[in-house]
Each structure stands twice: as C-alpha cells, then as structure tokens.
C-alpha cells in the first residue's frame, strides 16, 4: 500500500514537473542563424540575383569585388555603396550573422542606425533564414579590402538619418515570402525573385516625394531614376501588349537583346551584365512566367 | 499595271519616309551611323530568333549577318563619331569623346567578335541553358557562377581567383582580354553571338542616351 502511494506520488510529481517544464518550454524561437549551414555557392548565386555584387562593386573604376564605391545620384543626394568585404575595419569582417541578417532584412546597422532605402532591404525582407545563411557563407569568402566606405552625401533634410525611423514607420512593411498554394511552384518562384531579391520594383515602380514606392502603380515604370534615367512599365498588360513572350523575356534577361534586335543600355544593361545573365534557365523561366501573368 | 506601279512607288516612298522619321530627322554623319546601328540591329534580331529557338538555325544567314556587323564596327564605326557630333537628334553621350579609348576599344572588340562569328557560324549551337555557363540549374553542380570562372564568391576556386568580371563574356570593356580569333572561331556560334551582343549592350550602357 505504501509502495503504491509512493509510486503514485512519484508519478504525480513527475507529471507536475513535466507539466511545468512543458509550460516554460519555449517554442517558436527565432531560428538560431548561426546554427544554419550556409552554402556559399548558393549564396554567391543569390548575391548576383539580388544585385549585391552589381551595386557594391565599382566595375567602371576597376574596384575589387564588393569593396563598394559606386556612386548613385538621386533626388535625395548621392549615395555611395559601402565596402562589404571581410576587412574588419572597413568592411563587415567583424560582423556576426545576426547583425548581417538584421542589416539585410531589416535595414538596421549593427550600431542600430537605419539604412537609407537605396539599399533595397524592403525587398530583402523576403529572404528566408537559409537565404541569409547562404549569403553570409558567400560573403565570408570575399577577400578583405582595406578601403574605407565613403560617407553618404544626402541633402537636407535627408541627411538627418534618424528621420528614416519615421519613414520606416510610415512605409516599411517587412513581409516574409509566403507562397500562394493555389499557384504553381514556378510562378511562386518567379514572384519570390521579382518581388524579393531581384527587387525589380526598385526601379520599375514609381516613387512618391518621400521615396516610397507607389503600390497602386506597381511595376508601371518610373521617371527620375538615379542619374536621370527612366524605366519602362513591366506589368503583364504592358509586356503582353508589346509582344513579349516567356521566350523573348528570358532571352532578353540572359543576353540583353530585345526582340527588335536592340541591346539594352542604361541601368538595365548593367542589371543584365551583373545580375540576370548569371541566372539559371529555370529561374529566368520563373521570372518571365510571373511577370507575364495577368492575374 | 500603271496603277500598281504607282501604288508600289508610293508605298516605297512612304516606307522610306517612315524609316527616316524613326531616326527623328537625323542627317549627314549622324544619320549614317544610325543607319549602321539599324542594320546591325536587324541582323541581331534575326540571329537572336534562332538563338531563342523561334527560328531554325541557318548557318549561312548567321555568317552573312556577322559580315554585316563586322562592316559596321571597328574603324567603320568610330570614324562616324567625329568630335562634337553629339547632341540631338543623336543619341550619343558625350562620354564617347571624353572616354574615347573605351569607346573605340568596344568598337574594335565588336569587329573581332563579328569576324569570329563568321567563322563560328558553321559550328552551330551548343544550346545554352541557363546563365552564362553551359547551363545547369542553380543548385545543380555547384553553381552557375563558378562554371564560367566568373564567380565572385563561392567556396570552390577561392572566389576572387578569376575575378568577378568573368573572363568568359568579357564585357568589361577594355579590361577584359579576348581569346585569340582562332579560338573564338572554334566556339559554338551561340557563345560567340552572346559575346557580340554583350559588347553591344556594354557600349549602349556606357555611351547611349536612353529614351523611355
């Protein structure tokens, strides 16, 4: 009898402890990024797709890969892309993956200051944890370059960086990518690339006076791009009206050649040269499928 | 009979007028270089359709087209860009003259590549898959970027080894060295054609005013 009571008490205690443990057992923790195994090759591919390499490499000036130094003239002032090499002093060599993730997906520096949205982190918010781990693995392989980043030269009032917090509050809606279960895997992949890493809307969606993209004019083309350029509309309606097909669009993104035999100039020439020409056939198909879909 | 001749003549005149208007009233040397660009554009349009598989591959047409491009590139192109020949209706950017070396190097590069394409026409297509490499999926065998030796990053070849500019397509203007003409002519036609059009795009990117 005594033995039974002891066993029962023990069982109860065990159950109680279990219940307590269950109660405090944390779930849904943010994944520990440093625990993820990054694939540097996949990250390098993503860095092409996302334009990291294009914007942070001074190709014209013969600069080292990802050492920054590209000037971007805008209505708000002149941006200078910073050094992203592994140099600990001038690059991002002493960053952690968590700091990298916060910078890329949230636009916040390790010191807690907001980045100007010329850095398209509002798009990169769609990157998955694995994407970030892969990118980080790739960035870790970049040789250090000891060249300081140039300071941003913004006009008043844009040079007041904390003002960006207001901008963030008004316009920044970070959304992780959610595939549409009713659409094909190809279409979803295309949507992810176009709306996420490839950040097509950064140039093809017009911006308002605050530099925020006008959602209702998504991909409708824009004036006043950096350096005074213009971008054409790339909505499905417009592309179809202009006679684009999946095949011609893929080929243009791979080769820079338009259906009429012209070759891209302007910033799209650079996008193809430094970005889309490196993409796989499957991904180009996905992009074209998504862009040409009227729904 | 007479009527149909008249109609035909009228149509031809109208076509010519439209062509002239398309280049918005350019005359003289500006018109001459625009016509040269148009002639090359027509060739690229035709060959690109073959590259996309929208048309069957026609080696003779590729060779003849390459001859047309060669005839409008190199010195034949640069001589049409004398100093102070920019400004409307020309689409030439002033950088052509402030960075003449780059411009003329690209024009020469186009000539070398077009001549190589004449020779490579008979080689047919390798059939490009994706990206700049012979085309495997992005996750496939390593990475697309590494295959061409143009990888910026990645585990394999010590990332910066070959430089991110990519030796393959060599679009980086004067910096990128071209393989020698014989090696180029031994390549599949689509590979050489890609290098041709990348040169076009590199030059447009740097030296052409863009309209909407």
Image (cartoon, coloured by chain):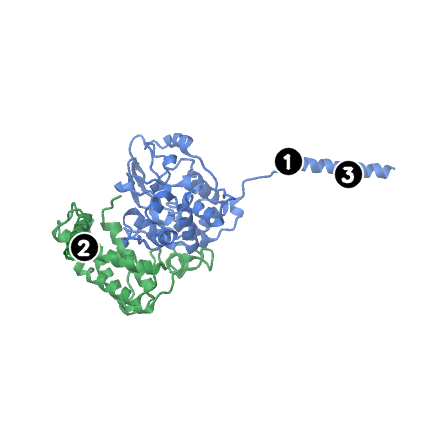
Tell me where residue A222 appears, x and y as whole percent.
31, 39
Q: Is residue A235 visible?
A: no
**The disc label shown at residue A11, or none:** 3
Measure the alpha-carbon separation of dots 1 and 3: 20 Å
Q: Chain B in the picture: what colour?
A: green
Which of labels 2 and 3 is toward the front?
2
Same-chain status of marks 2 and 1: no
At 16% from the left and 58% from the top, the residue drawn is B1
Which percent across, then down, holds residue B50? 33, 61
Residue A209 falls in which quadrant of the image? Answer: top left
Viewport quadrant of the C terminus of chain B: top left
Q: Secondary structure at mark 1?
A: helix
Q: Residue furthest left?
A: B28
Label 1 Cα neighbours within 10 Å, binned few <14 / some 14-19 / many ≥20 = few
- Decide if residue A158 is on the left or right side of residue B39: right
| Residue at the extreme front | B1
**Between disc 1 and disc 3, whose residue precedes?**
3
Determine crowd level at label 2: few under 14, some 14-19, many 20+ residues with C-alpha closer than 10 A.
some
Q: Colour of chain A?
A: blue
Residue A163: give x, y in percent of width and height: 37, 30
Compared across the picture, whether B130 is left or right of B2 comes to right
Are the residues at dot 2 and dot 3 in contact (C-beta closer than 8 Å)? no
Residue at the disc numbered 2: B35
Q: Between residues A50 and A204, which one lies in front from this camera angle?
A: A204
> Which residue has dot 1 on it?
A24
Q: Quadrant of residue B47?
A: bottom left
Q: Pointer 1 and pointer 3: residues touching (CB < 8 Å)?
A: no
Chain of the residue under label 1: A
Q: Relative to A283, say whether A177 is above or below.
A: above
Task: Indicate the chain on which mark 2 is placed.
Answer: B
* Secondary structure state at the residue bearing disc 3: helix
């Amino acid at each position: 009898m005594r033995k039974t009571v002891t066993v029962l008490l023990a069982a109860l205690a065990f159950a109680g402890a279990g219940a307590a443990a269950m109660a405090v057992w944390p779930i849904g923790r943010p994944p520990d990024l440093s625990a993820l195994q990054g694939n540097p090759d996949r990250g390098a591919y993503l860095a092409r797709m996302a334009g990291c390499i294009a914007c942070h490499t001074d190709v014209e000036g013969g600069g080292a890969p990802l050492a920054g130094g590209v000037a971007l003239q805008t209505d708000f002032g002149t941006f200078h892309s910073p050094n992203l090499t592994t140099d600990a002093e001038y690059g991002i060599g002493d960053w952690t993956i968590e700091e990298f993730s916060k910078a890329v997906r949230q636009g916040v520096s390790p010191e807690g200051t907001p980045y100007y949205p010329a850095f398209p982190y509002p798009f990169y918010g769609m990157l998955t944890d694995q994407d970030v781990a892969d990118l980080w693995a790739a960035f870790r392989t970049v040789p250090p370059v000891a060249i300081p980043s140039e300071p941003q030269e913004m006009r008043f009032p844009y040079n007041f960086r904390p003002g960006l917090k207001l901008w963030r509050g008004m316009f920044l809606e970070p959304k992780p990518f959610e595939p549409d279960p009713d659409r094909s895997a190809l279409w979803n992949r295309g949507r992810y690339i176009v709306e996420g890493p490839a950040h097509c809307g950064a140039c093809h969606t017009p911006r308002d006076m605050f530099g925020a993209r006008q959602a209702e004019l998504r991909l409708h083309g824009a004036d006043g791009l950096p350096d005074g350029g213009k971008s054409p509309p790339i909505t499905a309606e417009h592309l179809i009206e202009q006679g684009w097909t999946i095949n011609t669009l893929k080929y243009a993104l791979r080769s820079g050649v338009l259906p009429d035999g012209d070759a891209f100039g302007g910033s799209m020439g650079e996008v193809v040269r430094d970005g889309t020409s490196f993409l796989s056939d499957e991904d180009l198909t996905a992009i074209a499928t998504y862009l040409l879909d009227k729904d | 009979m007479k009527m149909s001749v008249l109609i035909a003549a009228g149509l031809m005149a109208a076509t010519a007028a439209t062509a002239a208007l398309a280049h918005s009233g350019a005359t003289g040397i500006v018109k001459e270089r625009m016509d040269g660009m148009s002639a090359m554009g027509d060739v690229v349009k035709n060959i690109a359709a073959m590259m996309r598989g929208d048309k069957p591959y026609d080696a003779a047409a590729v060779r003849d087209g390459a001859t047309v491009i060669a005839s409008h590139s190199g010195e034949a192109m640069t001589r049409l860009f004398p100093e102070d020949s920019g400004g409307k209706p020309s689409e030439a950017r002033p950088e052509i003259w402030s960075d003449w070396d780059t411009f003329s190097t690209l024009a020469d590069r186009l000539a070398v590549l077009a001549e190589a394409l004449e020779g490579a026409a008979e080689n047919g297509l390798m059939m490009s898959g994706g990206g700049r490499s012979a085309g495997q999926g992005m996750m496939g065998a390593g990475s697309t970027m590494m295959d061409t030796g143009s990888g910026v990053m990645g585990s394999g070849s010590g990332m910066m080894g070959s430089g991110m500019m990519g030796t393959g397509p060599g679009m980086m203007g004067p910096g990128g060295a071209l393989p020698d003409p014989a090696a180029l002519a031994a390549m599949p036609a689509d590979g050489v054609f890609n290098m041709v059009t990348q040169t076009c795009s590199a030059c447009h990117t740097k030296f052409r005013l863009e309209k909407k």
